[in-house]
Image (cartoon, grey):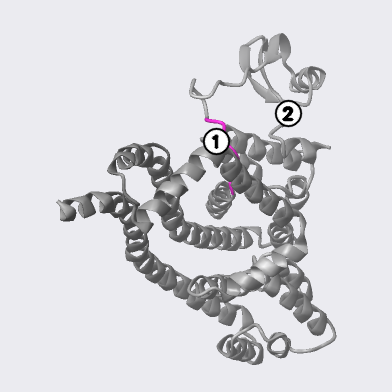
Amino acid sequence: MAAKKIQKQKVNPTFIWEGADRSGTRKKGELQAQNLALAKAQLRRDGINILKIKVKPKPLFGMGGPRRKAISPLDIAIFSRQLATMMKAGVPLVQSFEIVGNGHENANMSELILAIKADVEGGSSLTEALRKFPLYFDDLYCSLIQAGEHAGILEAILDNVATYKEKAESMKAKIKKALFYPTAVIIMAVIVVTILLLFVIPVFEDMFKNFGADLPAPTQFVVDASRALQEWWWLIFGSIGLAIFVFSYFKKRSRKMREVLDRLILKVAVIGPIMEKASLSRYARTLQTMFAAGTPLVEALESVAGAVGNIVFEKAVISIQQEVATGTQLNKSMSNTGVFPSMMIQMVAIGEESGALDTMLGKVADFYEEEVDNMIDALTSLLEPMIMAILGTVIGGIVVSMYLPIFQMGQVV
């Protein structure tokens, strides 16, 4: 129940109290507890004679205190790095949670960290505490932490997890950045064209009625488009909105549809190779991180399958796991899927033969991450002039088509 509540941003309330200790010294502070009765019981156990206690009011947005916003994967990556840094500096785990939680600028993230701290203080292992919040800590994350706790190398594993999360979020941010520019420009183009068709073209149409001659084909096409948009705008925009909703609905709920889309996107020029190399880098980086943590290969592959970000590669990893479980070498299993490049398979084979598989996987991940960076930069450079040319053609074509009748009149005169 607690895990379900925190996913909706609900954690134990904070109580503000005032009282006196056994020597009669006045004290005050804050305490987190499930309810008022448990808060009072905790204070009595600490030897506090309670004079006043109440629930701490939550700060309004923008009215002091930490801001409340959704917890993002980047917040989890930063938290992982902060916790790793604290533990490497020799700060105890519980105290690290308290320092990071109380100093976080996002109130929701702060509450999540302090809720984990309370579980750890109550005797739970860090893995058990994290597994209560699967919305923020997936199976891969928890498996790595569990491996670190069992091996007694939690500090090193936290450092590896932090690096893994940072690299993963960095790649996501770069891909989103590459797609944001063309998307924003296309949206602005649609808005501009809509304004022209709804408000500007009708003015020209009224003027053309007095010409007493047939309009040029381009002009007539634009005028007809303007009339259609004015009359049927609700149907056009409603249909577009409905199509987007239906697409999003079935994309979230239909694995078959997602698989078809994932296969299609891998075949799209320019975009496809970027998504393929991004999945390859995730595969290598995730497997390297889990293998370095001491996780058995078969178990590691199970977590890797959910981290590659593409169902085509996910099914390939599941196939690899099944073959490895029967004794097949990793490089041979990868080769049998037909989706991994020969260079990557050869690097894995060298790693298996030399006993340095995690090192080789790390080099493969670095290589493909750099490839993705270079391809995204090239894509951005290619898209900018291409989009400007398309925009110029569309908007310029509308403007020219409106002036064609005027040009023709001038030639007649």
- Going 77% across and 75% down the picture, which residue do you hit? 318
Does 109 lie within the magenta span? no
Spot the residue most to the front: 212
Q: In this view, does 51 lie above or below 145?
A: above
Residue 126 visible at all? yes
**Secondary structure mostly seen in the magenta stretch:** loop
112, above or below 53, in the image:
below
Rendered view: 370 above or below 16: below
Residue 350 lies, in percent from the top left, at 60, 91
Image side of residue 130 versus residue 344, left or right = right
* Most foreground residue, 326 or 280: 280
**Residue interval drawn in magenta:** 67-72
- Circle 1 SS class: loop
The x and y percentages for residue 4 are: 79, 39
Q: Residue at x 31, y 42 (%)?
A: 208
Kindly identify which residue carries mark 2.
12
Q: Which amino acid does label 2 sit on?
A: Asn
**Mark 2 or 1, closer to the camera:** 1
- Residue name at image x 67 percent, y 65 percent: 307
**As drawn, 171 above or below 56:** below
Is 190 on the left-hand or right-hand side of 261?
left
Tag 2, which secondary structure? Answer: loop
In the shown orientation, is residue 366 left or right of residue 406? Answer: right
Find disc 1 in the rendering and name its residue: 106
